[in-house]
Amino acid sequence: MDKVIVFSGGKGGVGKSTLAFNIAYELTKIQAQAVILISSDPSRSTEYLTGIPEKNMPGWFDYLMKKKHQVQYEEREIGLEDILFKTPYKMLYTIPCAEDPLNNDEIFFRGVIEKLIEFKEYVDSSKIGVVILDTPGSLVEAHYIYAKLFKTTLITTPSILDLEGGRQLLRLNKILPDDKKIKHTIVNKCISSQEIKKVEQALPDIEVIASISSLLDFELSSSEKKPISTYAPNSKGAKEIKAAAKAIYFLSKGEMEPEGSSRGRAKRGVLSQIYKRASRKIHSLSVR
């Protein structure tokens, strides 16, 4: 089981943050468990979408860097309880990037692996459903560390430049253990089956598990800071996000076939796997 799923593209502009926000929201509906959306992207797109104030908030990198803050006349290290915030949406929580994040390369050369391991152990032992970690656009040192600890899903588009960014990211597979190799992709901004074939030819070693085509729907819902399934619940985009969220859900449970699955299902943007209903019991999660 891999509760933490990293969204990465190898370059910016592929729509990672928009998909991360929408899929995270949809996951709360699929499994009736708390979902955490982490922003590690200094562009702060995730903070904008979740409505979290952009300043004076401790965040992900503050936690990783073991920064301290003042609490009732006592200075103590920033913990998860300090960076985990509720969003306006039931069971969806977020961790912002940081008010003044350092360069990702610099951070990961400062020895924060133990904090990532601590976070992973906390999530694995908790009743949290899935954690989506939104990464920076460019391929930086952080991706190497994240990929070794967490399962990564490639977010790409049929664009030649975006596919090249994906190929750069897939070079990580040479150093990753089998259970952490990047094997799946969600194709964004894809309007035809021909474009799916283009992606499959460019990235032959990974499987397309979902595709997103309804760009206008997402632009409108993002401008209103709303998940597409609440802004336009009957739209094509909402249906595509539900299919993508189900794919991520199965991936986190280790139930996704890594290779050899019929790609025709992904071309239609729908998985044929039977959706297993999770328990409807709402688990408590103590956050601020």
Image (cartoon, rainbow, N blue to C red):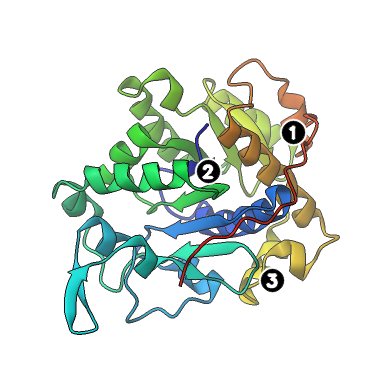
- Determine which of the numbered discs, if any, sits on residue 267 in the image: 1
Q: Residue furthest bottom?
A: 73
**Residue 254 percent location from the top left of the image:** 58, 28
Residue 255 visible from this viewpoint: yes
Residue appearing at x 35%, y 81% in the figure: 55
Q: CA distance from mark 3 to mark 2?
A: 21 Å
Q: Are the two marked residues, 1 and 2, in contact with CB atoms closer than 8 angstroms? A: no
Amino acid bearing label 3: Leu
Q: Residues within 10 Å of mark 2 (few under 14, many from 20)?
A: many
Q: Are the two marked residues, 1 and 3, in contact with CB atoms closer than 8 angstroms? A: no
- Residue bearing the label numbered 2: 155
Amino acid bearing label 1: Lys
Residue appearing at x 13%, y 50% in the figure: 110
**Residue 5 percent location from the top left of the image:** 49, 42
Q: Secondary structure at mark 2?
A: strand
Compare residues 267 and 27 and report the one nearer the observer: 27
Q: Earlier in the sequence, mark 3 or mark 2?
A: 2
Q: Are the two marked residues, 3 and 2, in contact with CB atoms closer than 8 angstroms? A: no
Residue appearing at x 74%, y 33% in the figure: 267
- Determine which of the numbered discs, if any, sits on residue 247 in the image: none
Residue appearing at x 70%, y 41% in the figure: 246
- Residue bearing the label numbered 3: 220
Q: Is residue 160 above or below residue 133?
A: above
**Residue 127 percent location from the top left of the image:** 55, 48
Q: Earlier in the sequence, mark 1 or mark 3?
A: 3
